Image: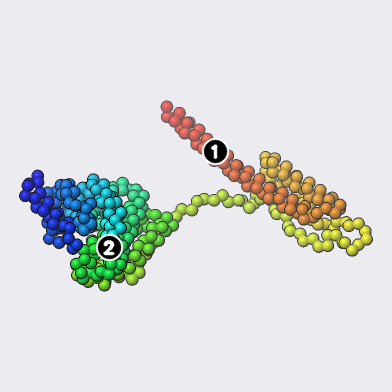
Amino acid sequence: MANEKDLYELETSVQKAVNFREEPPKPKHIRAIIIITFKLKDCTQIWSFFKKQPLLENQFTAWKFCHVLHKLLIEGHPTAITGAYVNRKTIVEIGNMWSMLNDSLGLGLLISSYTKFLITKIEFHFKYTAVFGNCTYDTAKLEVNSEGDINYYYQICIDAFDVMDSVFMLQDQILQNLYKNKMNSSTIHGQFRVAPVVLLIEDAKGLYNFSIFLLNKLHSSLPEEMLDGHRSRFSQLFAKLKKFYESLKFYGYITDLVTLPTLPNFEPRFKSSVVAIEEPQIETNASTAPPLEPDYFVTDLIDITADTPPTAPTDVWSIPSTSPDNMVDPGTNRTRDAWIDYTDSLQSASMHLNKGEDVWQLLKEKDALIKQLQDDIVKQQIDHNNEILQMQKELMSIRDELRNGSHC
């Protein structure tokens, strides 16, 4: 139960932390807020004190509010996530309000970007309760929440990447604002803007470690082909993170407050031990397909220099003497008929040649008939296999009925 003294200290600390001066919040005020939230075991009361501040009237107060809330999400009582989620409408209103401010210093757009990042972070942690505000995680709780479904880890990895992207977006805007206004981190005005980057460093470090855990988890259960997109996006985020840390080496204010993490020279590689299952394909039995006719090359089909009428060359192709009954199963009348039509067409072709008709057109017709014959045989083989499977199912059903009848 909260007593009046604790509530008074909380309200006073909030008021001092988000005052209207253009300077970063004092660490002692933020520390007092965090200690009191643990003492109260509740972070809902603090929102009544936040809303009393001129968050929509003073841009310095609004920016410092975002900083204090960010710190509270990382180091405050676990109920800070829930309290912020319930009051996210207030955060959105602050961002929308200051996004319309076209000030020369660009602080309105920074406030809008900061609120968008906070909403992304709050919704992520509220959705995945096993990932805490400082981006550490409980593997046992993750297993319970996933219920053994690998899709849970697949989705949480995508969402974690989204939060990392929002981290890089915000820090880039902060540093660009500093550059455009010709400020540096050694001045109080520069420190006022760049102070939240320290918290972004903590978020990026935790999300990076969490991403490696998730990718290892996914590669232990899924084939590599299914995770190409995850690896590609992680590669991009790794490059951004490396650039992020490199760019901060020149900001003395930041390096005095936090030690920049060290990344490996090359990004981690992930290999899956799961082999993708190939879909079965229907194979044609070569022994059942009819032999293809050899290609014949005809020269001097018509002697245009001769005075006598043109005659067809003899033996342009040989008509097979194989009986259609020997080519296919006697039960496949359709294929036999196609073969008879095919041989008849060859005989007709020989007669037409004597009349000087187009040989190449006849060759095309011959090839088309051969292809039709092969397609019919393949289709009949598939139908035949399906009939066998159906008969096997019926046979098993009859056996089960007889077995059950014998037990009665």
Which one is in front in this view, the residue at disc 1 or the one at disc 2? 2
Residue 78 left/right relative to 382: left
Q: Position of residue 346 (x, y in %)?
A: 78, 50
- Name which residue type carries label 2: Leu
Residue 365 left/right relative to 94: right
Measure the alpha-carbon separation of dots 1 and 2.
77 Å
The residue that appears at 23% across and 47% down in the rendered structure is 87
> Can residue 270 be seen here?
no
| Dot 1 or dot 2, earlier in sequence | 2
Residue 372 left/right relative to 147: right
Query: Considering the numbered disc 1 on the image, is that residue within a helix, a strand or a loop?
Result: helix
Q: Which residue is mark 1?
A: 390
The residue that appears at 33% across and 59% down in the rendered structure is 165
- Name which residue type carries label 1: Gln
Residue 93 left/right relative to 298: left
* Quadrant (top left, top right, bottom left, bottom right) of the C terminus: top left
The residue that appears at 75% across and 49% down in the rendered structure is 322
Q: Position of residue 357 (x, y in %)?
A: 83, 53
The residue closer to the viewer here, 310 or 279, is 310
Q: Which mark is residue 127?
A: none
The residue that appears at 37% across and 63% down in the rendered structure is 236
Q: How many marks?
A: 2
Q: Which residue is mark 2?
A: 105
Residue neighbourhood size for the residue with mark 1, other residues' Cα within 10 Å, grouped as few (<14), some (14–19), many (≥20): few
Find out whether the residues at labels 1 and 2 contact each other: C-beta distance under 8 Å. Answer: no
Q: Position of residue 219 (x, y in %)?
A: 37, 57
> Can residue 382 be seen here?
yes
The residue closer to the viewer here, 97 or 26, is 97
In this rendering, is residue 394 above or below 301?
Answer: above
